[in-house]
Image (spheres, rainbow, N blue to C red):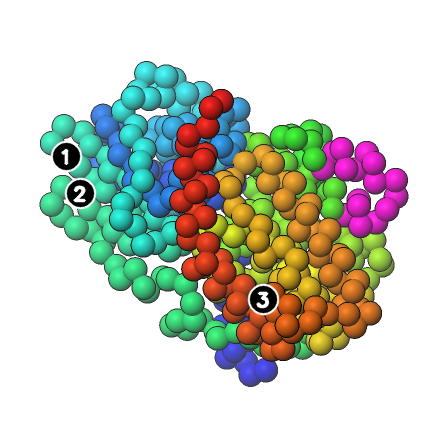
Amino acid sequence: MDEKLRCQIINLIKKEVVVATGCTEPGAVALAAAKARETLGEMPDHVDLLLSKNVYKNAMGVGIPGTGMVGLPIAVAIALTSGDSSRLLEVLTVPQSDVDEAKRWLSNNGDKINIGLKNPCEDKLYIECICRKGDNTATAVISKRHTNFIFISKNDKVLLNSDCSASGEGDIGDEPVLSERIVYDFATTSPIEELMFINDTVKLNTAAANEGLKGYGLNTGRILMENAEGDIVHTVIARTVAASDARMDGCTLPVYSNSGSGNQGIACTLPVYEYGKAKGCDSEKVTRALILSHLTSIYIKRGIGRLSALCGIVNASIGVTSGITFLHGGNYDQICYAIKNMINTIAGMVCDGAKPSCALKMSTGLYSAFVSAELALHDKVVDTCDGLSERDIDFSIRNLGRLGKYGMDQTDDVVLDIMTHKQL
């Protein structure tokens, strides 16, 4: 692989695997609110939020770090009272005194925040925040990526108006055109010193797992761990989903995300690292397996889209099955078999919003990842006549992307309607 392509891929991974605190959708909404308030230059007396349905549903029921509360109002309150937009997806990481101040403000001003859907809205990740104070108005818009501002204005003065497509998804600009063969070759042949940065994901995500085992959300990880009885796979999955328990229930610890999702970053990291450690794999092999896991997930996610009706654990656990197969000594063909097995197993998993029970979906995806890898290592792969699978691995991945990006559009509408019309 030539040096230019390697550099492009490294830059891509570093752009997609970044630190985030809390669920990234309310974090991105808070980021937009912080930017709008900063642009206004004073505390607003009214805030309007217009969101794509994917952002809306992912921010309804998830815990906001350090608050003991769920949903967007408290996230927006933190952004308005103490948010710093330069912190990007860590904008909600503030001292407890600031959280207390935000709660006081919200108790007196909650009716000043209006949250609704942006209609029409072609972008699945779209956040528009309008802050008003008297005759002054400031607007901040995020689109395509969680930290990508495309429009900022104050009153009639436009401060930023960028081309949305410049930061959209797909193979554009200086980003590499990927295939599974390129992903595999990069992970397995690049100089190891160029890949060591991926190990940074382990420390933060492991800390979140350790915290989660204390008991958060449904206690999925802790309960699974109590019943693991020394089984390696069960233990690995328990530790992984414990990190999701903590993160989705409002834990203040940061994690490394993947493709804009903390849960995807957790899933791509911990099973591969923990399993490699349990199996006594050397550090270089674990590092390459982590790269393979993260980059495979990034490659697949680019075809699905940043946000989708397809649960993000689908692409993340496909990354995991690639890494697990590699740790077992599997070759390129067997890794492709594992990916195809996964595509025909959990392709229909629906995203019904970010919430503490996401840990359950993560456990399902990870158990499937281990089963798919085991079959692949015995050269067992779904038939090319089955479902989404084709003979060519990249065509199979492309089919999954079509399902997630186009085939499930109406699913989002139905899910959001159900979530907003429940009889609680």
In the image, which residues are magenta?
A: 221-236
Which of the two labelled residues, at mark 3 and mark 1, occupies the earlier sequence position?
A: 1
Q: Residue furthest right?
A: 230
From the viewer's perspective, is residue 270 above or below residue 58?
below
- Contact, mark 3 vs mark 1 (Cβ under 8 Å): no
Residue identified by numbered label 3: 388
- Contact, mark 2 vs mark 1 (Cβ under 8 Å): yes
Residue identified by numbered label 2: 154
Residue identified by numbered label 1: 136
Tell me if residue 257 can be seen: no
Q: Main secondary structure of the magenta part?
A: helix
The amino acid marked with disc number 1 is Asn
Q: Name the image quarter holding residue 281.
A: bottom right
Q: Residue at x 86, y 46 (%)?
A: 231
- Secondary structure under tag 2 reads strand
* Residue 183 drawn in magenta: no
Q: How far apart, in angstroms, are the residues tagged by discs 2 and 1? A: 7 Å
The amino acid marked with disc number 3 is Leu
Which of the two labelled residues, at mark 2 and mark 1, occupies the earlier sequence position?
A: 1
Q: How far apart, in angstroms, are the residues tagged by discs 2 and 3? A: 48 Å
Residue 318, x across and y down, in percent: 64, 60
Q: How far apart, in angstroms, are the residues tagged by discs 3 and 1? A: 53 Å
* Residue 227 drawn in magenta: yes
Residue 135, x across and y down, in percent: 11, 31
Residue 315, x across and y down, in percent: 58, 58
Q: Residue at x 31, y 36 (%)?
A: 116
